[in-house]
Amino acid sequence: MTANARKTALVTGASSGFGEAIATRMVGQGHKVVLAARRMDRLKGLERGLGADMAHAVAMDVTDRRAVAHAVDALPAAFASIDILVNNAGLALGLAPAQDADADDWDRMIETNCRGVVNVTHAVLPGMVARGEGHVINIGSVAGTYPYVGGNIYGASKAFVRQFSLNLRSDLHGTGLRVTSIEPGLCGGTEFSSIRFKGEEERAASMYKGLDPILPEDIAEAVYWAASQPAHVNVNAIEVMPVAQSFAPLQVHRRDNSI
Ligand code: NDP
Ligand code: 8X3
């Protein structure tokens, strides 16, 4: 998508948070958007708000490969040529250290964050290659680069997203397609922490207490900027953090607790 061209984007996880903000930003710039997620009531509300000529809601569980392929194949003609795929649907579950973690939580993060990105990409990529243009934008996380206690599988799943983005670029060499990995840090204004802490709202809110986190609109801006570069420019990765978030030193455990 160059700045003036009118394109069609498919945004997964458009029922909330980043996905909703990305879809809204895209439509605000005159692009059409396929809104994909599981909660159809929320997608329909967004579709109404953005206008049914510009936004089209599609029920999609990204973990279900066949359902994803069917949903992409069944898109109405006005929304069928996907120029930009934003693989945004994802989640973290729990913050327990690996030895105390829930195996079902791990499975669901892998299913959603890894397999989900793979399923949707696999369904959309052949059409982009056949048309000779397209842009895959994957939403990773700083957790895919920097470890933190309790980040275990969530961080590993986002490292998968990062490496998958790089490997896609290699495979797509010469096709004209673009691939970008967007890697946000702590972001407020989404359901992310509420889902991570399974409805423990006080704990979820405490993540953002006393600081200014980045906001979904900041990520929508990064996505839009990457997608708006001239066709010869590929933005490989963008890492965005709030000023209030940075890096802690490596930890050292001493037998005698002397320091
Ligand atoms: P939200 O929880 O607000 O949004 C997550 C979205 O993913 C929802 O729209 C949800 O829709 C969708 N989703 C979850 N599971 C599935 C599924 N199986 N199939 C289809 N859609 C699904 O979180 P954010 O907006 O914060 O997160 C968006 C992305 O950004 C995630 O990949 C997250 O890991 C990443 N991220 C978030 C950060 C943050 O601090 N908030 C920082 C860095 C990265 P529905 O339930 O309707 O299916
Ligand atoms: C979520 C960002 O910093 O909460 O992907 O792990 S962080």
Image (cartoon, helix red, strand yellow):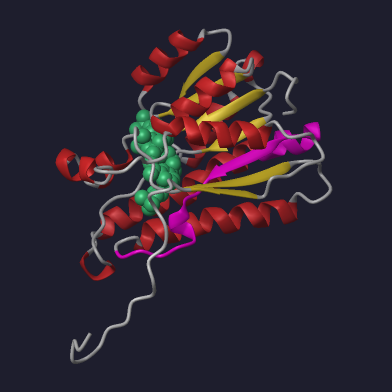
Q: Does the magenta stretch include residue 16?
A: no
Q: Specify the quadrant of the image occupied by residue 121.
A: top right
Q: In which quarter of the image is the C terminus?
A: bottom left
Can you give x and y, in whole percent of width and height, for residue 239 in the image?
Answer: 54, 50
Can you give x and y, in whole percent of width and height, for residue 246 in the image?
Answer: 42, 57
Q: Is residue 5 above or below residue 254?
A: above
Q: In which quarter of the image is the N terminus?
A: top right
At x 39%, y 52%, the residue is: 245
Q: How many numbered dots are placed on residues in this image?
A: 0
Q: Is residue 137 magenta?
A: yes
Can you give x and y, in whole percent of width and height, for residue 14 in the image?
Answer: 45, 28
Q: For the magenta stretch, what is the residue range? A: 125-149
Q: Specify the quadrant of the image occupied by residue 100.
A: bottom left
At x 74%, y 54%, the residue is: 171
With 127 as the anchor, is 182 left or right in this view? left
With 147 as the anchor, is 8 left or right in this view? right
